[in-house]
Amino acid sequence: MPKVQETTLEIDLRALTHNFNYLKSKLQPQTKFLAVVKAFAYGSDSIAVAKQLEALNVDYFAVAYAKEGVLLRDAGITVPILVLHPQPINFKTIIDWCLEPSIYSAKILDEFIQTAEASKQNKYPVHIKFNTGLNRLGFRPGSVDTIISKLESTSAIVVKSIFSHLAASEDLNESTFTSQQISDFKSIAKNFEAKVGYRPWLHLCNTSGVINYPEAHLDMVRCGIGLYGFGNAVKEDKVLIPIARLKSIISQIHKIEPQETVGYNRAYQANDYEMTATIPVGHADGITRQYGRGKGFVIINGKRAPIIGNVCMDMIMVNVTNIECREGDEVIIFDGTHRASDLAESANTISYEVITAVSQRVKRSFIS
Ligand SMILES: *Cc1c(COP(=O)(O)O)cnc(C)c1O
């Protein structure tokens, strides 16, 4: 790779293909694969990622909001798209763009039926979401009869799938709870099928569910983080390849004297003669203030340079006293070796947060 000349998020579409094939290898051949591409494909680029996955014959996409689905349709994506968290104000848009809503409450069901009937739909596909313990979105198991009676009152919609979401699939200490969610979901599905008179697809697993609970793969799985290179487990991280690498360059180097301070609020004070480097990436780019004051770090010429003082909007300052470096040298914030999950740990957070935070201001470049 040529060295970057400015802050750049490199997106490796070969790594995406590798991760997709690896996750698929964990599935039965008939199990469908839904790729979660919400939040700009976890901070990368939803159009480039979706195009690549469409070329690899992915079965479904999911986004959180209707406008994310519209972006994909505008880019020419034709694979079905599930909208995980729609609001009634967007139901017309959802239908106009052939997006498929998650129906998670009686209110949402009533309002979607109304919109579908008003636009003269017949058997418009929807996905019913059940709450089996996450307590975030979804019908309670006891709502099946209510849902069925609403469905019987209309021909405007049809249930293409029913699904639920695991609360702690990555945490094996919670396997008793997860197994309960799995068996509860299976009984909801049985009850629902018997009453609706046809067989919607069933899906439950996110990435860690795919890895840890093969008995719960059902008809389809919904993978996000694994596609982007993180498996929430050391063993999986050895195989998955992070698709995004955030790199920058050193804008300026300062030699500072003992007792001088660095950055806003004078949050860092030098003990001795020290060298600092200023890097053009800040909280407006996704390196939030939680990484400041010695917690987070970047890699310069193979060595860790701690972020000193407060993170600024457009810059960070790092300590390079013991690192041989020059203005213009490349800086790695995260890549395949210095993983975003390691940076996340420094500030007590998770890979999901670091990678989705990379803002739209940061230049994207692609490797394919
Ligand atoms: C985001 C999301 C996923 C993807 O989860 P990962 O852990 O990233 O694989 C799956 N299902 C639902 C409902 C989600 O909101």
Image (tube, rainbow, N blue to C red):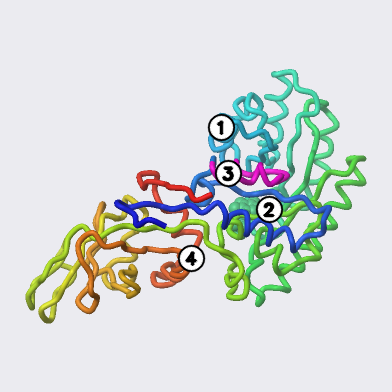
Q: Is the CB–ligand 1 distance for label 2 below 8 Å?
A: yes
Q: Secondary structure at mark 1?
A: loop
What residue sits right under mark 3 in the picture? 64
What residue sits right under mark 1 in the picture? 75
- On the rendered structure, is 97 left or right of 309? right
Q: Amino acid at mark 3?
A: Ala
Q: Is residue 51 magenta?
A: yes
**Ligand 1 rendered quadrant:** bottom right
Q: Amino acid at mark 1?
A: Ala
Q: For the residues marked 3 and 4, what is the alpha-carbon distance in whole angstroms?
A: 27 Å
Horizontal and vertical percent position of residue 35: 65, 49
* In front: label 2 or label 4: 4
Does 314 sit above or below residue 265? above
* In front: label 1 or label 4: 4
What residue sits right under mark 4 in the picture? 336
* In front: label 1 or label 2: 1
Q: Amino acid at mark 4?
A: Gly
Q: Secondary structure at mark 3?
A: loop
- Tell me the tag on residue 222: 2
Q: For the residues marked 1 and 4, what is the alpha-carbon distance in whole angstroms?
A: 28 Å
**Magenta residue span:** 48-62
